[in-house]
Image (spheres, grey):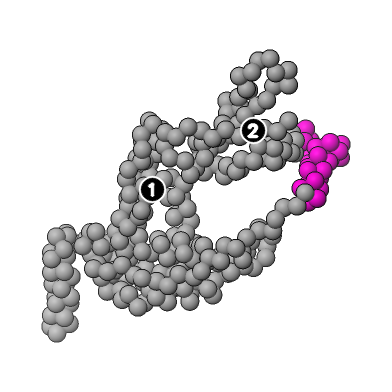
Amino acid sequence: LKLAKAQARIVYRNWSERRKLNLEPNEVLTLDKITSDFMKQMGDFAEQNEANIAKGNAPRLKVAGANNPITLRRYNEQCSILDNYVQPYFQSSRLWKKNIRSILQRTLLDFPLWIEGQTYLDQRGEERQVSPSIINKSITLIRLIWAYALRKGLVDWIPNIDRPSTDLKGRSRKRLTEAAYTKMVEHMKNNFQTKHKQVGSLGSDYHRDLAYQFYVFTKLIAWSGIRPPSGNTDRTLLRWSDITPTLDSSNLEQDYFLKRTEKTQKLGEAPVKYYIQP
């Protein structure tokens, strides 16, 4: 009987808590459920914003706590941050299945210490620590989850987690020298001019074409000075229609320009023209 009464008090407490929040009695308030609902909303907003952009309209939908409208590129980045850093932290800290209302702010302040101890393998198989930029993006995502919960009335605070200095100057890549660039180009040229004569799959016409395309792409980047597109945003991809000649038909050696819509441009702004050096 005592156990039954204790269980009844727990059920009543949970029911009363949800009714005060204007929620259904059986609504789940665990962190994993709140995070899932938030990410779904973010994805829906991103798709609607991309649809508006495709129609020539400005994106407007922003998730709670965000300064700018969400895009698919940003949404995909947030999914990666969640899967690789934020969710593993929640799970290792035993917060993932916990009621978000019972999580204390001081618990989340341990996140920088936890992620500093995490490592990953880079493209060369070398063990690396998580960069300050990724740490800050992870902290932002945690704050956005709590901002979403705050807007729903589930919590009354947003965690203020210490952020590391990005030290962009100290972490910047080495400056590309003319000698290094020349060596790179000669190596690329060698790949499609001589490597295709070797026996094996890497000597096929297909791989020769890939090597030649990479050589031409690198030269185009160097000649025009454009920022290479990552492929995450369709409007920044290179197209043949982006290349236009000058209007001076009397010029025997026609000059060409590359029209580019950069990711930092505002919607409706005229494309930037890059001069392609002959």
Measured Cα–Cα span from mark 2 to mark 1: 32 Å
- Residue at 36% in and 47% down: 69
Is residue 87 visible to us here?
no
Residue at disc 1, secondary structure: loop
Residue type (three-letter) at the residue carrying disc 1: Ile
Magenta stretch secondary structure, dominant: helix
Q: Quadrant of the C terminus?
A: top right
* Residue 203 coordinates in the image, percent (x, y): 81, 38
* Region in magenta: 179-208
- Spot the residue most to the top: 250
Q: 37 or 67, which is in the foreground? A: 67
Q: Residues within 10 Å of mark 1 (few under 14, many from 20)?
A: many
Magenta stretch holds residue 185: yes
Locate residue 164 relative to residue 147 in the image: left or right.
right
Residue at disc 2, secondary structure: strand
Would you identify the image quadrant in which residue 126 lies?
bottom right
The residue that disc 1 covers is 70
Magenta stretch holds residue 205: yes
The residue that disc 2 covers is 275
- Residue at 33% in and 49% down: 62
- Residue at 48% in and 44% down: 264
